Structure formats: structure tokens, C-alpha cells
Amino acid sequence: MQDLRVQFFVSEGTVTAVDGVSFEVDRGEIVGIVGESGSGKTMTALSLLRLIPEPGRITNGRILYGEKDIAQMTDEEIREFRGNEVAMIFQDPMTSLNPVLRIGFQVEEAMAAHSRFTNQQSRDRVVPMLQRVRIPAAKDRVRDYPHQFSGGMRQRGMIAMGVSNEPSLLIADEPTTALDVTVQASIIELLRDLSRELRASVILITHNMALVASLCNRVIVMYAGRIVEQGPTRAIFKNPQHPYTWSLLRSMPRMDEVGHERLVSIRGLPPDLSKMPPGCKFHPRCRFRIDKCLTEEPPLAEVDPAQDARCWVLMKNIPNPEAEALK
Amino acid sequence: MAQAAPISQPEVELTYEVPEQVTLLNDAWRRLKRNRIALVGAVIIGILLIVALISIIWTPYPVWLQAVGPTYQTPSLKHPLGLDQAGRDILSRIMGGALITVEVGIGSAIILSLIGIPLGLIAGFYRGKVDTIISFFINIWYGIPDLLVALILVFVLSDALHLIPRGVLVIIIAFALTRWMDVARLVRGQTLSLREREFVEAARMGGARDFAMLTRHIFPNALGPIIVQATFAIPAAVLFEAFLSFLGLGLPPPTPSWGAMAADGYHGMDFAPHIVLAPTVALSLTLMAFNWLGDGLRDAFDPRMKR
Amino acid sequence: MTAQPAPTPTTDPTIKTALLRVEKLVKYFPAGGGLLARNIVHAVDGVDLAIQPGETLGLVGESGCGKSTLGRVIVRLLPATSGHIYFQDTDLTKVRGEKLRRTRQEIQMIFQDPYASLNPRMTVGDIVSEPLRNFGVARGRKADQRVQEMMRVVGLNPNFVNRYPHEFSGGQRQRIGIARALVLDPKFIVADEPVSALDVSIQAQIVNLMEDLQSKFNLTFLFIAHDLSVVRHISDRVAVMYLGKIVEIGPSDAIRDKPLHPYTKVLQSSVPVPDPDIEATRKPILLKGEIPSPVNPPNACRFHTRCPIAQPICSEVEPPLEKKENGRFAACHFAGQL
């Protein structure tokens, strides 16, 4: 993805949901895109499949899949592309599955629609597909309707539809947010195993940093439509350079914390995309800002090998950040 | 390590400013203003109201005065809408009719609400036996052929029992008694869903008594659909009165009800169409205006229609 | 967090120090609606709890376990099917009408949804002052002052009393809800998923706020949530709920370090930690099967259908919630063995 910009044109003006986002995903990588509301992470993912809802549009940038630019594809090409090369799993399986069609039929349809398999082949592959996503008693449940499944099972059904055509890229947008934590654990395990089996890349979009620590090789942190930091998972978690990443990590209660430390909260409010301040978009909430942050927006620059951050200050230049934060 | 740290003051001032106070009503008002047809309707209704008010103190000629000129006279400079079969100035009578229309329309809406809203609130809020009884009545009432029954009611109340003299009041009552369940059913539905909302639970936790919960929490949030309903009820009432008057069962002569005027002039359709035309057009415009406004209000209040 | 040692046994009726005691609380709902509903949802099926003054008891469980229902029954937004709720020696289940209304001055609730818990037609000032007017505690100017004080206390600018809820963000609305809960100076507050609907960066603000308020006003909290990380952080003790029953109670760190009940252990192993090194070494214990329906809970131990260490006795004899160690209770025949 190069320099992507997604904008929404509404009566009050133009809202820029994604601005100048560039990143790469290699084969077999699991990349996590982390952000809160207003970060633009979902729009970035939707743009990969050209699924931006009205009144939004991709107004700039290229999305290169191999040689082809997704942003420039014709409708025909996109349809072929979706579900075949790239599959997407959404947050709420209840609304993404057709409630009046049987699960087995929907999985079969997903395959038949992309002509990678003949109709007969598709039908034969349905039960093994459901078994692969670990739906118990798959043979019996093939004829069930979505409402007969629990939330976790429906999500597995969605995953089955998604991987049925053996895509090279799987995009999961908050796949476990609506699920209980025990179910979440099993879905994440499933995604991990599937990505290995299929040798597919995965883009996991979430607001839950702990999930990212568990599953992803690389992390991209987004804020207000921009990438503010990216790098290998270990580097980001052990050595975050952007104040937002740093504060986010310290604002989460952790199961493994020793004693009781006060959480470092990020003050202020989530960004309002229609009223962005000048300079760095995070500066209104940043404890470590300097004058330059108010006027000039920093570029995304390399701060360590393979790690980039968008900040004038950088956490490594702050002697005792904890003390600052608790003031 | 619970140090007595001051509670962090989020910079409320820094991070959000609100240009003007945007209440929900403001928002609905803005959306309404964008709806052209609804605005046209509102303007027509405005004119209707003004004319009605003016007619209380002044009309070009007294409404009941006959023979101010030759009967059936077509519109002229002196009488812009002409004269009717008794030589009365039609313009003046139209103005008087506007007042009747306003009285019937708004009066009906008020009585409908007075009956329907409390019943709906109580049924929806308390549920159980109370609701069963009220719902039972609502359902029974729907089976009644309302127009017929309203007619009978008017007859019974006025002519048979002489309880209420023939006039606007009896019509309003008859109409309200046959259509109250529209409002009641709507309010009941609203109440049923609102009472489960967290802010109602929170009100109960705050010690609010039942009456306060109904009046302060449930009713104001049900207002939107209620207003829309009332706006649609008005043309129904007006039409009802016109219909009655047309049949000769409505307001007694020489009351300048538009329906009565149309009825009176019906026989002269061939040679003096202006007599029927004036009240009919007035009636049609009024009905359309209320419907347009009602549609506009419904869209404006609909929380799902965010641009 | 208050410096309270692990409190005393929870099911001992002789304990007088508890602020709130729940005994054999049961809440059933008829399922399928109508007068002749044959199915019964066993939302809360015999719960015993005691909450000490000044402590935060966390109540954690997954969807359908009944924790929100339990919270609402305790504050009497829902009537109990059977059982007792003792608040300072008064049995709340026996209180009705006006007397019940009066108890609201002492027991309050913070709700989950910051968007639905505030009346959109009322100004923020009215919302926070309403409880004052309901009980005649303060009127007019005195009420206004109290409202402004409360807003300051929760970190909101008091100049905004005349604004409407929709003009505020989610986190700010939650603060308004907290101000409303505090305005009557209650002793006990049930917080039902107070941070679940908020962004992560805002959650920390509200968690810190609640901790500060607790020490400032000497509050006792029942903190209901599904997120074990948050619950463990803010609570002194944690109670774990499964299918309408409490399966374990203990000090929050002990629950985390050495869970006794298999379900607690599974929960704890499923919660990811924001540390890739640690996560690389962990493997969650996956549960088999689905959560049973509360209409038809399993016999004896409710967890036996999915428990990794279930034995025959688990489907025959229901394990009681009993003391396993000092201050720790679990309902399992094989506590600590997973």
C-alpha cells in the first residue's frame, strides 16, 4: 500500500479517514494494525478490497497486489479478486452471514462464485472445510442455519467461507471483539494454524494490543488516519518510540502486573476527524510534546532498523518517562 | 499506592468546543428546514392559522349575512371568490371556515392526545393486567367502523340525548372517541421499548417515582412519533368534519364549514362551480399541507436518518 | 486499592462486618414469553456473596453467566425469585414501595452504555441533580452547587451543566453517569461493565477515576465485567461466575497466580498479555464444546461438560462453594488440580 488516502464527502465538509498510509505485507507474515476509534484502521482494511462505503472514496494512493493496483481495478477484476486472492472476515458474524441460507450452502457458494473449483468439487469440499475450522460434528451441522450456531461457531463459519478458496491474504477486522475471551483464544489459535497451513498472510485489525502480541509478527499503530509507528512486534512492545504507543501500552491493565501500579491514562478525547489540529495529530493528548509538535507534522521516519515512528521527540530521548506520565 | 493524586483534569476545554448549543430539537429543526415540501406545507398551515385568527375579529363581510349581492354571482373585484346560493360572500365564509377547520383539527388532536397518551403510557409502563385490559380495548376499538360510529355518536349525543349541542365540540369528541387508539397504541409501543432503556433504569436508581419516570423520562423521549401522529390526525379530523357537514350531519347552518359550503353549492356545479370550488380547494390544500408537514416531521425526527 | 487483608469467609452468616451479603440468591426468567412459558432461564442459581465495606469485589464471567442479572437483582432493579440480600442488616428482598425507593440513597449503580444511560432530553445538570430532587436532599441553589462539585470531582468542567448528553464523548458521558451515582453520597455502588464500551485509552481514565473516588469517598464497589485484566487490576477480591453460579472467590492476585477452579484457570490462560515474549511461551487451554444453555444447565457441576479434568463424580455430585484455603473458595471436587 502506498500513500493511501480515503476521504468522506459529507454535507459538513470533507473528512479524511486515512491519510498517507503506506506499508507492505510479505508472504506468510501476520501483520497487526492497531488503533482506536477514529484511527482509520478499518477504512484501511476495507480499501484493500475496495469496500469503502458511501460517501467515501479512495482519493489517492496505490494498493499493489503483486503487479496489479487494486485501486485501479475494474469492477469485474475486483469481484474476481475478492474472495479468491484476498478474503475478509468481519467483526459481527451474525450480520455478515445470510440468516436464511444454510451454512453449508453459503460456504459452497463462496467457492462456486469464484470458479476455482467446479460445482461438484465445491460441494465435496464443504464438510472438510467446516472440519478444518474445527466446527464439531461438521457433517451434521452443514445443514444448520446461522442462528443455530453460537457466536464463536458463526465466526468459524465465516472463516471457512473466507479460506475456502485458499486465498493468499486474509484480512480479519476485529474478528473476536464480539466474542468471549475463551472463544477468542480458540479463534486466534485457528487463525494462527490456518495461516501456517495455507501459507497465507494475515492482516489482523484490532484495538486489542494483547492480541497483537500473541499473534502478529509485525505491528502497525494508527492514530487519526495515520501510521504513527510500525515495526516488528517485539520491538514495538519492548521499545515503543511513539508516545501514543508507549502510553497505550501503559494504559492497559495487564494480567501479569506485579503489585498494583496506577494506569497511565491518555488524557483528552479520541480524535475528531473533522476537526484536526495543525502539527502532529496526537499533540493535544501528548505528555511529551515540544513546541515543534504544535505546528509541524512529523514524517514517518526510521528510528531503528525496521522500526519507524512519526514523532519529533521519540521515547528514547526522554530520560524518565514514567515520572513525567504520573505527574 | 493510593496516593492522594488529584484526579486528572482532562482538557475538556481544549479538545472540544461546541459552536452553538445543538439540542436534539435543533437537529430535527435543521433537517426539517431542508425538506422543501414540508416547508411548503408549513407555510400553508401558517397562512391557515393567520386567516383563522383574523376571521375572529374581521371578515370582509359578516359570514352569515345573506344577499350582499345577487346570488350565485361569479368572482368579481368586490367579491374575489364570488357569492354563494344565498348571496353570502364566499371569501368571508372561507375565512370563517378556516377557523372552524383549525378548531376541529387542533381540538381533535388535543382530545386524542389527552385520551390516548395517558392510556398508552400506563399500559406500556405497568404492563401486566393493566396492559391486558387496555390493549383489549384498543384492539376492540379497531374493529369498529369508525366513521359510522362517529356519525352515530354525533347523532346520539346531540340530537337524541341533547347532551352537547350540535357544533364543533361534539364533532371533536365523536372523532376522538373513535380514533384514540391510534395514539394509545403508538404511545404504548414507545413506552414498552423506552422503559427498558438504561436511562430509565438509572432514573429508578435515582429514586424517581413512577409518575416522574413517565413524565420526565419516557414521555419526552416518545414525543417525536407522537407529534407526527398528531400532525396526521389533524387532516383526518378535518376531513371527518367536512364529510359530516357534507352529509348535513355536521355543523348547523349558517356555520361556514367548508364541507357544508361544498354541500350547499353542489347543486350549482354546472352553472356556479365557484361555490363548490373554493371550499374544496381550501380543504385539499389544507389536507395536503398537513400531510407534507407530517412526512417532513417524521423524517426529521427519525434518528436513523443521519446524513 | 485499599489495604485490606483477605477478608473473612463469605458464607458465614455470623459475619456482621459485611456491608452487603447475598444469600442463596436465585433469579429465574420465563423463556419464550407468554403466560405459559415452559422454559425457565436459570440466570442466577443460588449465589452467596459478602462484600466488605471499602473493598472492590470484582465479578467476572463470560456472556450468559448471569453477572449482569446478579448486579441488577442486588440493586433491586429486578425482583429476586428467591434468596436474601442483606444490606446493613436489612433484607432488601423484603422491602417494597417507598421504603425500597429510600434505599436508593445508599445503593447506586453505574451503567455500561454511556450512550443509553443518560436521558437525551435532559441537560447534564438536570441528570445529575435529579436524585437530589427526588429525595428532597437539596433544591435550587444548593442542588446546583452540589452538581458542580460532583462534576469537578469526576473531572468535568462544571460550566457545561446546561449541555446535553450527545454533546459529550463516551468517556465524558460515563463520567456524568458516575457523578449521578455519587451525588447522593451512597455507600455501595454496583458498576455494570463501566468501561467495556469505551476506547482503551479512555478506559484507563475511568479506572483511575473510580480508584481515586473510592479512596476519597470510602466507597464499596461491586465491579462487574467480562475483562479479567481490568477486573483483576481494580478489585481486591474476584468472584468468577459460570452459568448462574459462583465457581470461585479469592483475592485478585491469588486468583491470577494460582486459580483453583478449572474454569478460572481456563479464563486466565485465555487472556492475552501485551508482551510478545510471554505470549510466545503461553498456550491457552481450549475448552471443548459450547457453553450450555441456561435453560437447561448440566447436572451437578455445571462445568463438567467442558472441563478438561472432569471425572464421573462431577456429573453426579454438585461441588459446593467451600473454603479451600484461607480466604479462598472454590466449587470443585478437584480444586487446584488443573
Image (cartoon, coloured by chain):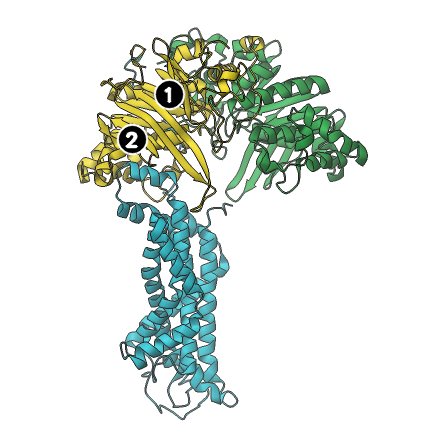
Residue located farthest toward the bottom when viewing the structure as drawn: B70
Q: Colour of chain B?
A: cyan
Give the percent coordinates (x, y) of residue B84: 41, 87
Mark 2 surroundings within 10 Å by alpha-carbon count, few (fewer than 14), some (14 through 19), many (20 or more): many
User: Judging from the image, what is the letter of the chain drawn in green?
Assistant: A
Q: Which label sits on residue C45?
A: none
- Say if B207 sits above or below B218 in the image: above
Disc number at residue C108?
2
Q: Residue B294 or A39: which is nearer the viewer?
A: B294
Report the residue marked by disc 1.
Answer: C58
Name the spot of residue C304 as percent of width and height, x first: 51, 20
The amino acid sitting under disc 2 is Gln
Relative placement, left or right, of C232 versus A301 is: left
Image location of residue C317, percent across then percent down = 45, 19
In the rendered image, the quadrant that contains the C terminus of chain A is top left
Left or right of A176, for residue A255: left
Tell whether label 2 touches label 1 (CB within 8 Å).
no
Q: Nearer the viewer, residue B113 or C329?
A: C329
Q: Residue at x 68, y 19 (%)?
A: A195
The chain containing the residue under callout 1 comes to: C
Name the spot of residue B185 as percent of width and height, x first: 41, 56
Could you say which quadrant of the image residue B258 lies in?
bottom left
The chain identifier of the residue carrying mark 2 reads: C
Q: CA distance from mark 1 to mark 2?
A: 16 Å
Camera-side residue of C164 and A283: C164
Quadrant in the picture for residue B98: bottom left
Q: Colour of chain C?
A: yellow
Residue furthest out toward the top: A319
